[in-house]
């Protein structure tokens, strides 16, 4: 069963704009991960944030974690058409995935 | 070699067929996973192997039978599937259970 929800379910932006996706989860966690999936193919690991971290950066990605609200956000800055994909958060050792956000970046 | 490979990429089978999906990794990972993903839905965990032993079976019907012949290979044997089993089947591996997982490209299965 899904751990939580992602918001929005779909997001369409212009190239160069920032994209923000949110994830909520239900149970206590040790870490939270974000994955990206292109066109229904394999998932690619983007970033892992531990429960004692509040913010983490990787290139154009910025992830925040608020354990009191059981929520996380993924910010992609200066988006590119190649960022078009579905983005999932996942929690737990055995990865329970959120519903995902389908991001479309228009050139 | 830093990737997980899956074969075949596509598979069409009838409800009476027997087929197998294969997954391979040469990263020395000791945990391997099977996921099922329906269209526009997140992946759902099916099985976990840790050190070649089945450690988690998420109440998957017996028409799906996993096998881990060695630490690099993971198979999913399919028999008497139903049309609702049509989905993308993803394999993943991690250094050990609970660590970051690396996914293969998936096998898109259609059951007629």
Image (cartoon, helix red, strand yellow):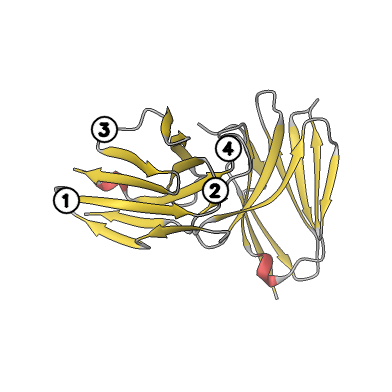
Q: Position of residue B40 (x, y in %)?
A: 49, 51
To the question of a shared chain for discs 4 and 1, the answer is yes
Q: Which residue lies under the disc numbered 1?
A: B17
| B75 w.r.t. A79: above or below | above
Q: Which residue is mark 3?
A: B62
The chain letter under disc 2 is B
Viewer-proximal residue, B25 or A29?
A: B25
Q: How many marks?
A: 4
For this view, does B70 lie left or right of residue B26? left
Q: Is residue A80 above or below residue B78?
A: below
Question: Nearer the N terminus, badge 1 or badge 3?
Answer: 1
Which residue was labeled with disc 4? Answer: B96
Q: Are marks 4 and 3 on the same chain?
A: yes
Q: Does residue B59 appear to the left or right of A19 in the view shown? A: left
Q: Which mark is residue B28?
A: 2
Sort mark 4 into few (<14), some (14-19) or many (20+) by Cα contacts within 10 Å. some
| Quadrant including the C terminus of chain A | bottom right
Q: Are marks 2 and 1 in contact (CB under 8 Å)?
A: no
Q: Is A80 located above or below residue B15 in the figure? A: below
Indicate which disc, 4 or 3, sits on the residue closer to the N terminus: 3
Q: First in sequence, mark 2 or 1: give its number.
A: 1
Mark 4 / mark 1, whichever is N-terminal: 1
Image coords of residue A87 (percent x, y): 63, 52
- Chain of the residue under label 3: B
């Amino acid at each position: 069963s899904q751990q939580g929800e992602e918001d929005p379910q779909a997001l369409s932006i212009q190239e160069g704009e920032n994209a923000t996706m949110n994830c909520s989860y239900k149970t206590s966690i040790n870490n939270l991960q974000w994955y990206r999936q292109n066109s229904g193919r394999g998932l690619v690991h983007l970033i892992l944030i531990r429960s004692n971290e509040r913010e983490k950066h990787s290139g154009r990605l910025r992830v925040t974690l608020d354990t009191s609200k059981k929520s996380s956000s993924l910010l992609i800055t200066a988006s590119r058409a190649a960022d078009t994909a579905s983005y999932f958060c996942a929690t737990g050792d055995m990865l329970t995935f959120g519903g995902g956000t389908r991001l479309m970046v228009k050139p | 070699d830093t990737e997980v490979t899956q074969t075949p990429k596509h598979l069409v089978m009838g409800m009476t067929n027997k087929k197998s999906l294969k997954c391979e990794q040469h990263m020395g990972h000791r945990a391997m996973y099977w996921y099922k993903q329906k269209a526009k839905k997140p992946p759902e965990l099916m099985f976990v192997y840790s050190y070649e032993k089945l450690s988690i079976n998420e109440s998957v019907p017996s028409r799906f039978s996993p096998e881990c012949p060695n630490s690099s290979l993971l198979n999913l044997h399919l028999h008497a599937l139903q049309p609702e089993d049509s989905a993308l089947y993803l394999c993943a591996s991690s250094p050990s259970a609970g660590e970051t997982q690396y996914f293969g490209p998936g096998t898109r299965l259609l059951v007629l």
